[in-house]
Image (spheres, rainbow, N blue to C red):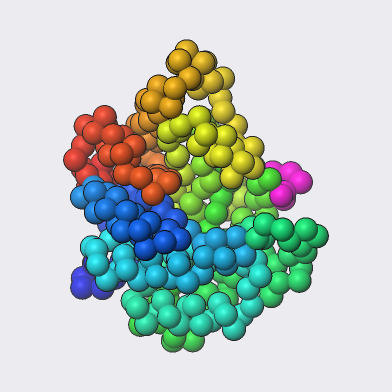
């Protein structure tokens, strides 16, 4: 909260030199929901600036995402930021979702193009009402401008950025043009896809500056916690690049999940330390609904919570 109001993205960057945020995905069962909230309770003590909740491919977890976000808003002190995607959505459905979030006092949205559900061979984004994330950003911004949100500024809007390059873009110049379109449509901040070499983030930050993109860039960091998770991470990130020094460190282990986890958490901690040294606007930790790695990162950095880092 700020001055008795829910925290808007713009408030966050006025209040904190560096923001710290965590991402969760909605569980599919009641047992999973209870387990997640135990992890959220542990992470709440770290006082993150905000937490985000993912939105399944094609809106497949729409209700689960809404339930998770509303529960976080009602039962914790955290500021939730729900994902919202373009794929398989029309303006009526998106409008209804925004109305629900506005009624619940949700003040921020992460607007993404998103992925089609599994089994949709031949899917054509042009068939959707919102073909590109910039169109969704514009719709969300106009929703607020029409006075549909209690906060006169409307929703704060985050968008995605890709330090290693967008997998669907033919070249980096076109990628910057698409990102600039999202910013011009009304985006307030950029949260990046995960990366493992901070030089990719710093180059991305420089290219944004050259393209006239001046909104804050939040760096996405995901600790490697298992061999299976590492493979899955590469699939989800569509070819995340593992730097040679990281691979050498992993190759020195005995291959067990615990050894891989130790290397992964150490690497992520060093990423965070270096990002802080280079004045990153924000750090966004992909938690995979577990609190242990994130709490270890904070402990190794020598702080008890995000306020000590900010």
Left or right: 307 in relation to 177: left
- Compared with residue 97, is residue 123 higher up or lower down, i.e. above or below? above
In the rendered structure, does residue 248 fall within the stretch colored magenta? no
Left or right: 65 in relation to 277: right
Question: Of all residues shown, which one is farthest toward the top?
Answer: 252
Left or right: 52 in relation to 200: left
> Residue 251: percent from the left, percent from the top?
51, 16
Which of 203/219 is in front? 219
The residue located at (41%, 54%) in the rendering is: 24
Q: Is residue 289 visible?
A: yes
> Residue 197: percent from the left, percent from the top?
52, 30
- Compared with residue 163, is residue 215 higher up or lower down, i.e. above or below? below
Count of numbered circles on the image: 0
Question: Of all residues shown, which one is farthest toward the right?
Answer: 122
- Compared with residue 35, is residue 89 higher up or lower down, i.e. above or below? below
The residue located at (46%, 32%) in the rendering is: 226
Left or right: 209 in relation to 265: right
Q: Quadrant of the N terminus?
A: bottom left
For the record, the magenta segment spans 168-174
> Residue 100: percent from the left, percent from the top?
43, 80
The residue located at (37%, 35%) in the rendering is: 272
Picture quadrant where residue 287 is located: top left
Q: Is residue 267 visible?
A: no
The residue located at (38%, 56%) in the rendering is: 32
Picture quadrant where residue 297 is located: top left
């Amino acid at each position: 909260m700020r001055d008795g109001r829910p925290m808007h993205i713009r408030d966050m960057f006025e209040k904190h030199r560096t923001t710290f945020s965590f991402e969760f995905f909605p569980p599919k069962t009641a047992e999973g929901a209870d387990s997640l909230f135990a992890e959220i309770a542990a992470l709440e003590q770290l006082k993150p600036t905000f937490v985000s909740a993912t939105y399944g491919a094609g809106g497949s977890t729409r209700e689960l995402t809404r339930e998770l976000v509303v529960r976080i808003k009602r039962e914790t002190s955290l500021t939730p930021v729900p994902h919202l995607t373009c794929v398989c959505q029309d303006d009526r459905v998106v409008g209804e979702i925004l109305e629900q979030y506005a009624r619940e006092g949700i003040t921020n949205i992460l607007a993404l193009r998103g992925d089609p559900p599994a089994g949709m061979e031949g899917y054509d984004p042009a068939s959707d009402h919102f073909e590109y994330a910039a169109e969704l950003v514009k719709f969300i911004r106009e929703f607020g401008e029409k006075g549909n949100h209690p906060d006169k500024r409307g929703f704060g809007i985050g968008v995605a950025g890709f330090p290693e390059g967008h997998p669907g873009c033919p070249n980096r110049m076109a990628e910057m043009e698409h990102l600039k379109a999202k910013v011009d449509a009304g985006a307030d901040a950029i949260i990046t896809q995960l990366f493992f070499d901070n030089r990719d983030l710093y180059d991305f930050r420089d290219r944004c500056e050259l393209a006239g993109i001046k909104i804050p860039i939040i760096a996405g960091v995901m600790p490697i916690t298992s061999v299976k998770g590492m493979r899955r991470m590469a699939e989800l990130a569509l070819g995340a690049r593992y730097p040679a020094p990281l691979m050498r460190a992993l190759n020195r282990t005995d291959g067990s999940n615990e050894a891989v986890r130790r290397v992964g958490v150490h690497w992520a901690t060093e990423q965070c330390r270096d990002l802080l040294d280079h004045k990153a606007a924000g750090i966004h930790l992909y938690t995979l609904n577990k609190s242990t790695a994130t709490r270890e990162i904070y402990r190794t950095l020598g702080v008890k919570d995000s306020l000590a880092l900010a």
